[in-house]
């Protein structure tokens, strides 16, 4: 009892001179948006793995898989339907490895530190899959240096993937962030799909695709952007609603006429732009119909630097 009182007093004294205590409206442990209803492997204790071999075996069976420790060189692990992959504590994840979620539904990926995919691959690649929640992870590689195509995306969704929520992740030090829709020529498979909610993410030193969206629908809110050539890039008839984000030094924070043969559309509300510009050539009327809680742009960076990434929601 005495010890905890002393600890609280010490903390109060220390924080009196530090940054204001985080004021946050959104809950930090809640699934919101297009992936609502995703349950992954359910609520059981599951299997805890500490090696690539054990992870590969566990992934074939699905269910709840907990990774303990940072595993290196697992290659690309296929994740099947009805699976949750969760990191234990604040220092668990994968190096020189990645996940592919292909032709699957109902998958959760949380609290994992993903560092550097095998060359030419994505850290997490979602194809022809629905109901995927990617939350409180850390994605990075070697930085904006060398050949920009050496590593592919940090978190990509393609081939008609749908009903996705990417929340409270940190993305940093990489060329190509998050690609939604891989080709101008894939309208038949992608139109009406590729619906993604991005919220409370933290992007620092990622060059582009934050995200890039072709054909699909994206809602991007309460996120922090620091640096980049393009932020939210809407292409090929995609519609995006970009709300209450903080953009600092992002050359094209929101843009609708870059890189594709047809433009996309966008609407924006309540964003904070510092040394950043928007180029919206076509206005979108899209508004999400689900319930969600926005934190204001002015708080997006302080909130996500503290409450996004690994070690916040732990298993
Ligand atoms: C996933 O779980 C649901 C509900 O239990 C079940 O109906 C479905 O068959 C499972 N899917 C696969 C591919 O195992
Ligand atoms: C804005 O850009 C100018 C010129 O590049 C730079 O000097 C300044 O530090 C930038 N401001 C911020 C907030 O990064
Ligand atoms: C864009 O969003 C704002 C804020 O929600 C809204 O008032 C406006 O009507 C929207 N624009 C269009 C074209 O829908």
Image (cartoon, helix red, strand yellow):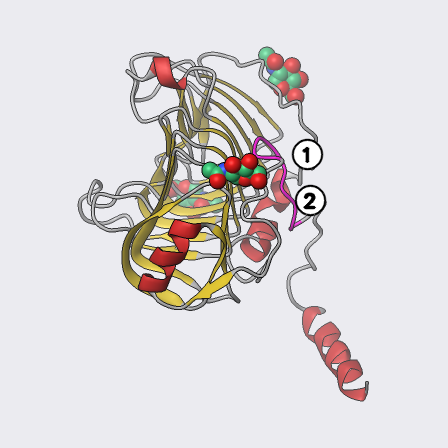
Q: Residue at x 59, y 43 (%)?
A: 39
Q: Quadrant of the C terminus?
A: bottom right
Whether residue 48 is visible, yes or no, is yes
Write the residue at 39% across / 33% down. 103
Q: Nearer the viewer, residue 241 or 249?
A: 241
Please state the extent of the stretch shown in magenta in the rendering. 28-36
Does residue 279 lie above or below 1 as drawn?
above
Depth check, front residue: 42 or 135: 42
Tell me if 126 is positioned left or right of 165 in this view.
left
Q: Quadrant of ligand 2?
A: top left
Q: Quadrant of the N terminus?
A: bottom right
Q: Main secondary structure of the magenta part?
A: loop
Magenta residue check for 31? yes
Query: What x and y, as percent, mark residue 288?
Result: 62, 23
CB-based contact (under 8 Å), mark 2 and mark 1? yes
Q: Is residue 162 magenta?
A: no
Q: Which residue is mark 1?
A: 292
Residue under pointer 2: 26
**Category of crowding for the residue at label 2, using alpha-carbon neighbours closer than 10 angstroms: few (below 14), some (14–19), many (at least 20):** some
User: On the picture, is 44 further left or further right than 59?
Assistant: right
């Amino acid at each position: 009892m005495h010890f905890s009182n002393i600890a609280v007093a010490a903390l109060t004294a220390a924080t009196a001179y530090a940054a204001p205590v985080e004021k946050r409206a959104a809950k930090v442990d809640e699934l919101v948006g297009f992936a609502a209803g995703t349950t992954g492997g359910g609520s059981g204790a599951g299997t805890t793995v500490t090696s690539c071999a054990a992870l590969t075996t566990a992934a074939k069976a699905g269910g709840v898989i907990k990774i303990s420790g940072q595993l290196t060189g697992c290659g690309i692990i296929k994740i099947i339907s009805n699976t949750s992959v969760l990191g234990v504590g604040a220092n668990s994840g994968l190096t020189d490895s990645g996940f592919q979620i292909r032709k699957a539904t109902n998958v959760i990926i949380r609290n994992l530190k993903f560092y550097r995919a095998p060359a030419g691959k994505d850290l997490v690649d979602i194809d022809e899959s629905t109901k995927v929640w990617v939350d409180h992870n850390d994605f990075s590689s070697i930085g904006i240096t060398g050949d920009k195509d050496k590593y592919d995306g940090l978190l990509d969704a393609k081939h008609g993937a749908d009903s996705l929520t990417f929340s409270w992740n940190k993305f940093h030090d990489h060329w190509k962030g998050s690609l939604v829709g891989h080709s101008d020529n894939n309208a038949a498979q992608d139109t009406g799909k590729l619906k993604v909610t991005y919220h409370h993410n933290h992007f620092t030193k990622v060059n582009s695709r934050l995200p890039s969206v072709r054909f699909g629908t994206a809602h991007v809110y309460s996120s922090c952007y620091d640096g980049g050539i393009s932020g939210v890039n809407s292409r090929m008839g995609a519609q995006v609603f970009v709300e209450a984000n903080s953009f600092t030094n992002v050359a094209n924070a929101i843009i609708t006429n870059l890189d594709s043969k047809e433009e996309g559309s966008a609407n924006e509300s309540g964003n904070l732009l510092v040394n950043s510009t928007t180029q919206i050539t076509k206005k979108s009327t899209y508004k999400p119909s689900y319930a969600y809680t926005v934190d204001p742009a002015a708080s997006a960076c302080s909130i996500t630097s503290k409450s996004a990434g690994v070690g916040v929601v732990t298993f």
